[in-house]
Amino acid sequence: MAGLMAGFGRYTHAIVRGTPESLAKGALRSSQAEVDVTIAQREHDAYVHVLRTTLGLEILELPADETLPDCVFVEDAAVVCGDTALITRPGAESRRGETEAMKGALKELNLNVVEMTDESATLEGGDVLFTGREFFVGLSKRTNQRGAEILADAFKDYAVSTVPVSEGLHLKSFCSMGGPGLIIIGSSEPAQKALKIMQQMSDHRYDKLTVPDDLAANCIYMNLPNKGHVLLHCTSEEFPESVKVFEKLKDHMLIPVSNMEKRKVDGALTCCSVLINKKANN
Amino acid sequence: MTTEAGSETEVKENAEEKSAVQLDQSEKTTEGTQEVAATEGEERQTEKEKEKEGKGITRYLPTWFKKQKSQSQTSPTKEVPPTEEPTIKVSQEEAHIPEVNGHAEEVEEKEAVGPQQQQVKEKESHSNASADTEPAGEGKVESAQKSLEGTEETTKEGAKEEKKKEEVEKEGGQGQTFIFQSPLRLVRKNKMKLVVCHVTLLDGSDFTCEVEKRAKGLFLFFKVCEHLNLLEKDYFGLTYKDHHEQKCWLDSTKEIKRQIRSNNWQFAFNVKFYPPDPSLLSEDITRYLLCLQLREDVASGRLPCSFVTHALLGSYTLQAELGDYEPDQPRPLDYISQLTFAPNQSKEMEEKILELHKSHKGMTPAQADCQFLENAKKLSMYGVDLHHAKDCEGVDIMLGVCANGLLVYKDRLRINRFAWPKILKISYKRNNFYIKIRPGETEQFESTVGFKLQNHRSAKRLWKVCVENHSFFRLNAAEQPTKARFLTLGSKFRYSGRTQNQTRLASTLIDRPAPAFERTSSKRISRSLDGAPMISITDTSREAENGREPHLELHSDSKSPVRVRGDNIYVRHSKLMLEDHDKTQEEVLKHQASVSELKRSFMEAPPPSPPQLNLWEKRLTSSPAMATRVQQQTVVPETEASAAAAANGDAKEPAKTTEVEIEETVVVQEISKAPKAAEELQTQEVKDRDGAGLQKKHESVSSESESDEEAEYHPNVSVSISHTQIPEEKEEEEAEEEQGKKEKLTAASSPVEPEQAAAAVEEEEKQSSKEEEKKEVSTEEPMMTPDEASNGITSREEAASVAAEEEELPKVNGETSVVEARPQVICCSEPPVVKTEMVTISDTFAAQKTEIATKEVPIVHTETKTITYEAAQLDGSGDGEPGVLMTAQTITSESLCTTTTTHITKTLKGGLSETRIEKRIVITGDCDIDHDQALAQAIKEAKEQHPDMSVTRVVVHKETELAEEDD
């Protein structure tokens, strides 16, 4: 009953999905990197462990599907905000099948599920940045205007602004939320440009936390009871300079999570889970 | 505003008193009016009454007073002032409408007499009743104008007045000038027909009340607010459907009758400005009304929200209307299904609503309303007024006006946003809507973004909404009063009410027990609105909802006087310019001493001048041979072209000087015309055409208000800045708006020029002193805003002959002066705006001229080189083109040569505004002077000064024996 936009960062559930063996060969990637599936799986387990054990979220883990090499990146399959879940239509055709299992899981959680049936629309969750007050949708190779429109239709309460993403895979490949009104942003020129656009498009004021590495700017923020501000971010092995920046966040519970292997296939921290705030009475 | 409230009553009293005193005069003077009356017997009384009232009011409103005098007395003495007055009056009348209403009522009671009513009826029979009052006002105005003319030809005044009256009667329907409406109303109020207005309130009920057919929008609005017991009324307004079924905001400063569709007195009471934080509202009743509006917005789909939000808002509505959920009563479900909470209301939603309703147990209606608002205000489309438009590529978009600025939507997506601080100017022309964007950190130039609206009406409507929203939400409370005044100055479209800050302040003063009110929203909900299109096109015309109480209303009226003052200021300028010529040498001499300083300041301050100064100084030092002459020349340059001419005259070139001056004068006229539009025009006309001109002017003014296809508005203005900017803006707006005027203007300008030129020549011959004065003004002006200049001028001029107007003006000037300086600068972002009417350029020259001119009259050598820079984008802005002259500015600077810079900004049909900068460079010197070099330097400087413009034409004109021409 908290009403609109209350409790940004509050989550009770997380949907994750196993890492298929086919990830090593079949997962889409912008580089030619070799992926060690075993390491990737280990990282993923650690990731889920943090969510479940450290943070106390209820985890709904979908089984890996070998025919869907990218299925571990569940974020792209759905956008959940409040009680509404939008099943996306991934821009990468090989990933369209990922939404089926996601839809089932979300329905299981009694969410108001909206599907993107328009065949001209594409949208991947990695391009959707929800700030707690509004949406920014990156228009990228994977997400188009129509997809953003459908998202706006699904979440009528919020302003939905589009942001061109010229570099990088997704909008959230170089930014994420670090708290209420705090945007973590990479220092690259495209990232800064995108931030400027977002700031101009918004009626709200956002603080920014600039990190040296674009990829390090993808973090998971939560605001959990008894834990306060929580930030899952990259490890110092991956991006030491950026981690130094995060360590300045005194009010946050900082949890470094390694994501070395999955990053090789453009997977970021946020990509690996769909976070849901499910109220007890629902 | 508070002070003004008192003034209303005072005005009334004074009017009565004065009326008694002045009756004699009025009777004597009113012969003309009486004549009219003779024709129509009864009108005499009305006129007399009018005069009386007018006199009483005149104290407070000098302009009115003058007008009346001119009318009644046809006083020859006030020749010049009257001309100014009429124009001013027009503006005032518009602004003051609310007061009029208030006065009218009281007066009516006192003065209402059977015979008058009969007269009114008669008039009505001839024409529309509404028209009757207006015509009278016009007639007065005209008479005033004529009287002004009469100053020259006082003997004819009587006849003129009669004619005027007749005209007024004939023209009654037009109602162009409302100047005398207040008096008229007083007189005719009795006669006025009462009209029944039907106002649909937010709870769906109808409120019916009677208003005079002549009543202004504010009058009805206050009646409704009174009925609602609403004090925080600034957030609300009345709407009506125009001929195209478009919802429009009723302009509270205008007569209702003239806004609505013929005889369709149907209105709706609506929220006009959605408070971003409803919790800051003072009273529950205000929040309740806001809730009612939002319930409708949500139910109609105008305010989109999600299923959950629909349910949540609906549950709060139930809690507010029904109280706690009562499980025993089966009614809720049935009841709910009859209510409309959402465009697509499903059973599921109703169940959800009920479920949520249960959770609100114990919540009071007021608390439920607060919760409703707390959620509604977070919706992204809360308070966003959407307008259909197309972008430059013809793609359908929506423009949303809200508290923070202008939003651009494509479908549901926000694709751009222009916060108010980013917007430098808002304008429209025809069906085009433009915003000028402040350059970003990395950008050098401001950009203009254009949108195409469906038609001219929608463009204007959008523009109005923007102006009002910007004024309401962005301007400061403390400074708002002044702002409001200035905003409303020339154009009707300024927001005349209180800003949000002001109304918040006012709300803190509310001291009454929370009024009890009945929640009957169910009516509304049951009505169920059709799924209105997402886009609600609402026009915001200004409302003037000022005070909460009738007194406050009066205040609003009082505001109008302020506006008038502003107008006066402009008028003065024009006058000043005119007067300057007439000034005595003594004055000139006095000023001479300061001229040099002024020059310096002038040179330094304005952007264009600095480089020139340097050059000038260099050359002074570098070329000793030229020293003497150069000095003289230097003086000339300061005064700009005219000055140059004068200087030349001193040394060698009387002929040239005359030419130059002529041009200058022309420029000045244009300048005044463009920015000030009606006012300036009037002044010009007065000069040139006297009576006829005046009448035309008035007409043009009225036409402006009625059919403005274009308008501008500079929202950026910070409060302090806003004042100054606003005047300019107004000017521009007016200019743009007045297409009809444009023609007149152009026509007037061309004719004027010769006249002025002649005048200028004469002046030169006769008195350099005048020029000197002018020079001073000009020098000052560039630095300062027009107001300041006017101040300075006024002091001098007062002796000359501004009379009553001057009195008013000084105050205004003082007020504005402080703020003014900056605004100009802002305007300058574009080509230097009008304000710097360089009218003066001649001052320094004049002084020198007096000394030297006659001696050296034989023109030795003067080269007149004219470099015309036209905006590269735009073709030459020929006067013949349809474009409206928006601004014109002339700047003179010193250097080897005398440079006269004229900035002429015109609005073209295409919706583009083009600025043409004309530089006239007069190089005066001995054969020693390298003219080629000088000219090259001048061109170089010009390019440097206007990097974004191109030199389209360079004209070299040799006039000197000695001098050589250079390209």
Image (cartoon, coloured by chain):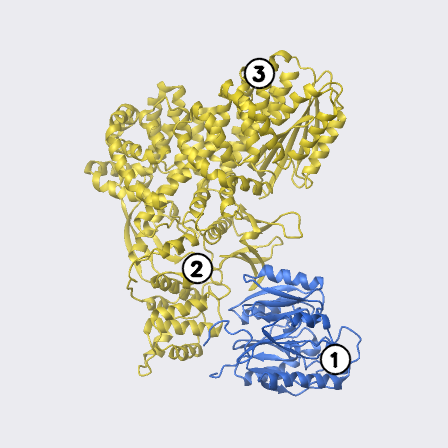
- Residue B612 x %, y %: 68, 32
Q: Is residue B310 above or below residue B49?
A: below
Quick check: A134 left or right of B323?
A: right
Secondary structure of the residue carrying tag 1 is: helix
- Label 2 neighbour load within 10 Å: few <14, some 14-19, many 20+: many
Quick check: B306 left or right of A139?
A: left
* Callout 3 touching callout 2 (CB < 8 Å): no
Secondary structure of the residue carrying tag 3 is: helix
* Callout 1 touching callout 3 (CB < 8 Å): no
Amino acid at dot 2: Pro
Same-chain check, marks 2 and 1: no
- Judging from the image, mark 1 belongs to the subunit labelled A
Chain letter of the yellow region: B
- Look at the image and give the colour of chain A: blue
- Judging from the image, mark 3 belongs to the subunit labelled B
Quick check: B657 left or right of B276?
A: right
- Label 3 neighbour load within 10 Å: few <14, some 14-19, many 20+: many
Q: Is residue B684 above or below residue A49?
A: above
* Residue position for label 3: B850
Q: Would you say residue B240 is visible in this rendering?
A: no
Query: At x 68% / y 79%, what residue is drawn?
Result: A257
* Residue position for label 2: B275
Q: Quadrant of the N terminus of chain A?
A: bottom left
Amino acid at dot 3: Thr
- Residue B898 x %, y %: 66, 26
Q: CA distance from mark 3 to mark 2?
A: 64 Å
Mark drawn on residue A261: 1
Q: Is residue B336 above or below residue B8?
A: below
- Judging from the image, mark 2 belongs to the subunit labelled B
Amino acid at dot 1: Glu
